[in-house]
Amino acid sequence: MLYHSTTTPSHRVDLKEAILRSLPPDNGLYMPDALPVLSSDFWAIWRDLEFQEVAYAAAHAFFQEDVPAAALKDMVEGTLTFEVPLVCLSPGDHILELFHGPTLAFKDFGARFMARLMAWLVRGESRELTVLVATSGDTGGAVASAFHQVPGTRVIILYPEGKVSGLQEKQLTTLGDNISALEIAGTFDDCQRLVKSAFLDRELSERLNLTSANSINLARLVPQSFYYLEATRQLPEGVDPTFAIPSGNFGNLTAGLLAVQLGLPVKQFIAATNINDVVPAYLKSGTYEPRPSTATISNAMDVGAPSNFARMQALFGNSWEAMRQKIVGYRISDDETRAAIREVKSLHDYELDPHGAVAWIAARRWRAANPTHPTIVLETAHPAKFLDVMEHELGKGVVEIPERLAILAHREKVAAKLAPDEAAFKEWLLGNR
């Protein structure tokens, strides 16, 4: 299959170029020339399949003959080594727990699959692959874990100074080996801008053999579509869910749209944001106005210029009306988020992290007008990753800290500090090879 740029559809490349170069030279995003649809034979039996079998069918639909069946099955099976439970808190109110992977965040799905796909794409080559990633929290930790000590790769993680939680920062900055962290004196949007500037410098990109692990890379989104199928499969037959998705860069919601393209029946998507509500505002007005992001307690969603908006537009044929028919947006404040954490703990004895809490409030608002339709809230990270917020709302000792997080507390942070300057960033890349 060929892949085209959302900005210049005539610019088309093969799978290897789309994944390893990540970003087209026109600053668009790569999309498949033909969006796949799973056959009626698959949908007739999918509820009887195992999660890995369902995921393989979805992956094969996207990559087809470009990746041999045996290699693709190995990638899927190596990625999905943990459970994806759907928890029912009350009739119609469900939580999809996506934090059971090695770094306790949903980004483990995309990062682990991407690492395996990239390793297969560069098999037999001698050049080192440099993986750039901008993170507002969980992406960096998942990518660091997935690529740690992978031969022939080095990973450079950019994160905004003072805007990730303490344990998230330790996940980014304590592995060493082939993992380097850059602490940027700015916002996530600055980090994302720096990464894009490196890719758009074609000489630099070729010289350093750059690739991206952000959701600008299609290899991140395909595996995230897997759990939409798995969540729906756990509901009774004939029930079309509405997914409430904590949203920042909108890769997660875009992955849900790809699942719908495959044929998954979904009633509605809820784009739940904090006060960085560029997309909910667009859904109301039809005007897209990116702006500098504002820091909140749901830090992974502090994005003022969501990269995947271009893909969302492409999937809806650039129609505002079509998009707002399928996606409804809600803006949630920090005070509301804090209240939801306390409320869900009090009513259901369940601990929602700040991002899941944002989606919970949005789902409740939607269900007020649609009481007979079930919602699935994506709980994207373990609450222990946001211990300061959780302890402030629920008290110390309430949230159990998993051992894989607890052991990070006393490890030494190692990160280089940089200004959000493109020239300085490129100089650092060339000087630290």
Image (spheres, rainbow, N blue to C red):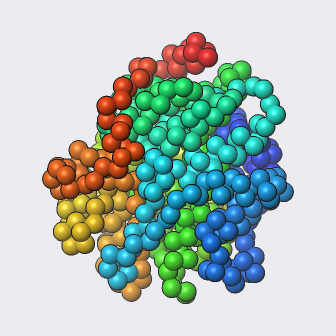
Q: x%, y% of residue 220?
A: 60, 49
Q: Which residue is more in the foreground, 25 or 95?
A: 95
Q: x%, y% of residue 36?
A: 74, 65
Q: Which residue is more in the foreground, 2 or 62?
A: 62
Q: x%, y% of residue 412?
A: 36, 25
Figure quadrant of the C terminus? top right
Q: Which residue is more in the foreground, 44 or 24?
A: 44
Q: x%, y% of residue 146?
A: 57, 42
Horizontal side, residue 128 vs residue 344: left or right = right
Q: Residue at x 46, y 25 (%)?
A: 182
Q: Residue at x 70, y 46 (%)?
A: 117
Horizontal side, residue 278 vs residue 318: left or right = left
The quarter holding residue 272 reads bottom left
Q: Which residue is more in the foreground, 131 or 298?
A: 131
Horizontal side, residue 16 vs residue 301: left or right = right
Can residue 296 be seen by looking at this rendering? yes
The quarter holding residue 143 reads top right
User: Considering only vertical position in the picture, is 350 above or below 141?
Assistant: below
Q: Residue at x 54, y 45 (%)?
A: 307
Q: Residue at x 67, y 31 (%)?
A: 151
The quarter holding residue 314 reads bottom right
